[in-house]
Image: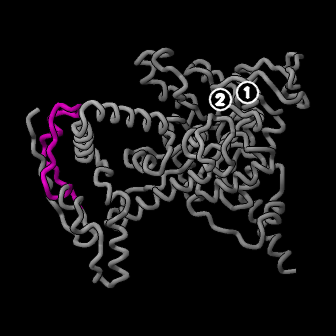
């Protein structure tokens, strides 16, 4: 009897929150709070990073003109993004397919990788951010929030509604703040900028959004859901069962049995309107960076769902200079923000940045040997001085000093095998002059100014003056 009463109280409390908390305004749930309590089990596990990230992202979306994010492929990339000032991180399924999936393969974005790959990459990113926070905190620097909210790609859910339910749970366990689901057929899923995309009926896409919401409620986390439609450039549909899709049918069938549809912006608008009650953000995948198209989509959605937040993929698949001039590119995101596109992201930024940087270094190394690497190192010194770039001291960056501190605590301060003290890094990167040559792309003024900064050692805290000498070109 007590168990039943407890369940009833929990359900009543949850219902009250759904009805009165402005966080849930405009969100529909076609199930009861009692269903949530009945399905969550007797122990509710706390998912701190997911909860904190969801709350932080929600606050950012409501206090900033827009939240800009780049796709991160690794934990180190995520740390650099946060250090550089970005407030959220995007975890792209395309990037995971290309170079970071649990199958150990390089794949195109066609749902070929194991379904737990994105949660595992997100987990790794959060682990890296956790280490950065630990190092920062151990040094007595507590003014920075390392735990940027993660917005992660669930693709088409890797199956039906139950698959979406389980994938959402895995995302929350990995500490993700927001998850997006698209309305493609999972078994035929394609990158939004590839051909041959097949949509599921509007009703099936909504079921996956409901499944994701139920999973978040069962786990007790206010995870944000982003609904993506690929209808703008899709021309195939699995079935004509949903009357909401009927106006876009052509009456033709393919050899595989799919129904041909018109696609286009009107089809995307219709689906966005249908998805809006079940998601915090709506994303229309587009074929080009077109502000007028973005405006039409935004106005149509907001006319039916005032205040609904929108998302926009500033995609590397677009040839930006071919579509827009420099002035239009510079104001593009500001204009999107004014329309209601609160989350704007570059999906494959990590992939392109990683590949170009390594290609340029490798080519220069082949041509000029160590001179090429020395120049890269000089740029690192300069960026450390100007902007606080942390990875030039790679031993400290990955936590050597932190684990020295752990060892000293264990040994009551008497450990003789700590790693950072007496290291090459301490000798050559903290106390000895760094030679920065002017004229290598970052300016002589920055190169010739003395660097004064804290160079903490967790064993012997001290303030060290770093000398910078200017050598002739």
Nearest the eye: 73 or 69: 73
The answer to whether 156 appears left or right of 329 in the picture is: right
In the rendered view, tell whether residue 37 sits above or below residue 373.
below
| Mark earlier in primary sequence (2, 1) | 2
Left or right placement of residue 109 versus residue 374 in this view = right
Which secondary structure, mark 1? loop
- Which label is found at residue 142? none
Is 347 included in the stretch rendered in magenta?
A: no
Q: Is residue 391 above or below residue 190?
A: below
Range drawn in magenta: 429-455
Which of 382/59 is in front?
382
Picture residue at 59% right of the left edge, 51% below the top: 177
Which of the 4 image quarters holds residue 159?
top right
Q: Is there a contact, CB below 8 Å, between mark 2 and mark 1?
A: yes
**Picture quadrant where residue 449 is located:** top left
The residue indicated by pointer 1 is 197
For residue 192, the mark is 2
The crowding category of the residue bearing disc 1, from other C-alpha atoms within 10 Å (few below 14, some 14 to 19, many at least 20), is many
């Amino acid at each position: 009897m007590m168990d039943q009463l407890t369940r009833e109280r929990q359900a009543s409390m949850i219902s009250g929150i759904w009805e009165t908390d402005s966080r849930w305004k405009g969100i529909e749930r076609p199930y009861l709070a009692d269903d949530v309590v009945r399905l969550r089990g007797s122990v509710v596990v706390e998912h701190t990073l997911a909860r904190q990230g969801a709350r932080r992202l929600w606050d950012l979306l409501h206090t900033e003109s827009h939240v800009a994010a780049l796709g991160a492929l690794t934990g180190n990339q995520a740390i650099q993004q946060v250090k550089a000032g970005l407030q959220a991180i995007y975890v792209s399924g395309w990037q995971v397919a290309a170079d970071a999936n649990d199958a150990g393969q390089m794949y195109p974005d066609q749902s070929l990788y194991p379904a737990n790959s994105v949660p595992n990459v997100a987990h790794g990113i959060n682990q890296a951010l956790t280490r950065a926070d630990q190092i920062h905190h151990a040094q007595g620097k507590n003014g920075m929030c390392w735990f940027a909210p993660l917005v992660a790609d669930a693709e088409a859910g890797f199956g039906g509604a139950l698959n979406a339910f389980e994938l959402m749970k895995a995302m929350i366990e990995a500490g993700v703040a927001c998850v997006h689901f698209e309305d493609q057929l999972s078994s035929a899923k394609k990158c939004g900028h590839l051909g041959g995309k097949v949509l599921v009926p509007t009703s099936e896409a909504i079921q996956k959004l409901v499944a994701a919401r139920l999973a978040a409620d069962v786990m007790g986390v206010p995870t944000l859901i982003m609904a993506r439609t690929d209808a703008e450039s899709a021309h195939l549909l699995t079935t004509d069962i949903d009357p909401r899709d009927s106006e876009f049918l052509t009456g033709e069938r393919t050899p595989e049995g799919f129904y041909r549809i018109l696609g286009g912006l009107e089809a995307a608008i219709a689906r966005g309107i249908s998805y809006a009650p079940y998601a915090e953000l709506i994303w229309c995948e587009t074929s080009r960076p077109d502000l007028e198209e973005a405006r039409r989509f935004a106005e149509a959605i907001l006319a039916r769902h005032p205040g609904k937040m929108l998302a926009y993929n500033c995609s590397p698949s677009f040839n930006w200079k071919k579509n827009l001039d420099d002035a239009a590119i510079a104001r593009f995101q500001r204009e999107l923000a004014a329309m209601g596109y609160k989350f704007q992201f570059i999906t494959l930024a990590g992939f392109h940045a990683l590949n170009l940087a390594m290609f340029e270094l490798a080519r220069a190394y082949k041509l000029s040997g160590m001179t090429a690497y020395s120049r890269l190192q000089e740029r690192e010194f300069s960026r450390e001085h100007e902007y606080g770039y942390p990875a030039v001291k790679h031993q400290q960056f990955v936590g050597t000093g932190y684990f020295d501190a752990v060892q000293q605590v264990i040994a009551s301060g008497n450990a003789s095998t700590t790693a950072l003290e007496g290291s090459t890094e301490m000798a050559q990167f903290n106390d000895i002059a760094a030679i920065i040559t002017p004229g290598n792309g970052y300016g002589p003024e920055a190169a010739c100014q003395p660097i004064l900064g804290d160079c903490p050692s967790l064993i012997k805290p001290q303030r060290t003056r770093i000398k910078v000498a200017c050598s002739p070109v």
